[in-house]
Amino acid sequence: MASLKEIKGRIASVKSTLKITSAMKMVASSKLRKAQNAVAGMLPYSTALGGILEDLMAPANVDEAYFRPLPTEEPAKVALVCLSSNSSLCGAFNSNVLKKALAAAGEYKALRYGVTIVPIGKKISDSAAKAGYGPFRDYSALCARPNYEEAASLADRLVAGFLAGGIDKIEFIYNHYKSASSQETVREVFLPMTSVEESGRQERDLIVEPSSREQVALLLPKVLRLRLFTVLLDSAASEHAARTLAMQIATDNANELLQELNLEYNKGRQQKITSEILDLEGGAAQ
């Protein structure tokens, strides 16, 4: 059995850790509320803009390059845009993205495709580099504080690479925010786009001024930029939710451990006092 001094030291250590986890939970919870508001504020605009574009997405209105199929005569080149956090202590948030990213890369490599990972976040960047996919450009600031201008710049670079033929397929791999206690690691195709025939959407007979093709040319880049920015906001909300939950669990475990240590300390102290009393009684009897 540990001495009272050792137990007392452990109690002090657990109390110190408890203060840290409680503070981190409060900070993560506050950031989560802001991230939720950002996503909620973005969704109506994103949905409306995407709906307008879908109504105009007849084949004649869109550059065919956006629907380019994967090449068959030579290996395709795939870019996986993977989102993580810059720091740890958020449960399986980062490891889930890494597992799905490496699994996706393995699938494409089995088909002899060229695979490039575009990591957004220090954790996925470090892990992917260890797996042999580095070095990478630093996009860590994008996951810490999602910024539309920087997201739009990255989206434009990805689209330009796709249209120029340097990339044949682009996927997002990130944690989708479902609720404060649930996040789902997903893979989504960014490019090529899905045609009207493939999606099953019905073409609408609309009169558009100046023309549907001009409107699509104006809206399409905005929608693609907005899609990447929305993914960044979604991933950020998931990170804060995962960290809030992880710190809540850590805090609960610390409280339980503290109760056990206090009980053990009180038992040990009681035994020591009882032992001292018995020694005094034995000395008096002599």
Image (tube, rainbow, N blue to C red):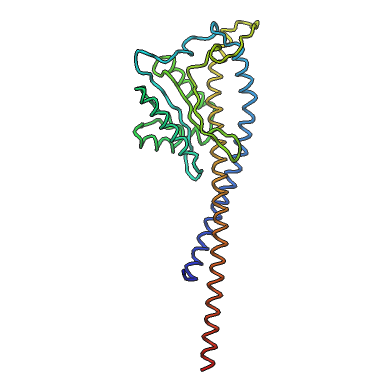
Which residue is drawn at the image coordinates 41% and 22% (left, top)? Answer: 78
Q: Where residue 129 sits in the image (x, y, percent)? A: 36, 35
Viewer-nearest residue: 29 or 186: 186
Q: Where residue 80 sits in the image (x, y, percent)? A: 43, 27
Give the quarter of the image for residue 136: top left
Q: How many marks on residues?
A: 0
Q: Where residue 183 sits in the image (x, y, percent)? A: 55, 36
Give the quarter of the image for residue 130: top left
**Residue 152 left/right relative to 167:** right
Which residue is drawn at the image coordinates 55% and 79% (left, top)? Answer: 273
Give the quarter of the image for residue 59: top right
Residue 140 position (above or below residue 252): above
**Residue 178 left/right relative to 135:** right
Viewer-nearest residue: 197 or 144: 197
Q: Where residue 250 sits in the image (x, y, percent)? A: 54, 51
Which residue is drawn at the image coordinates 56% and 49% (left, top)? Answer: 249
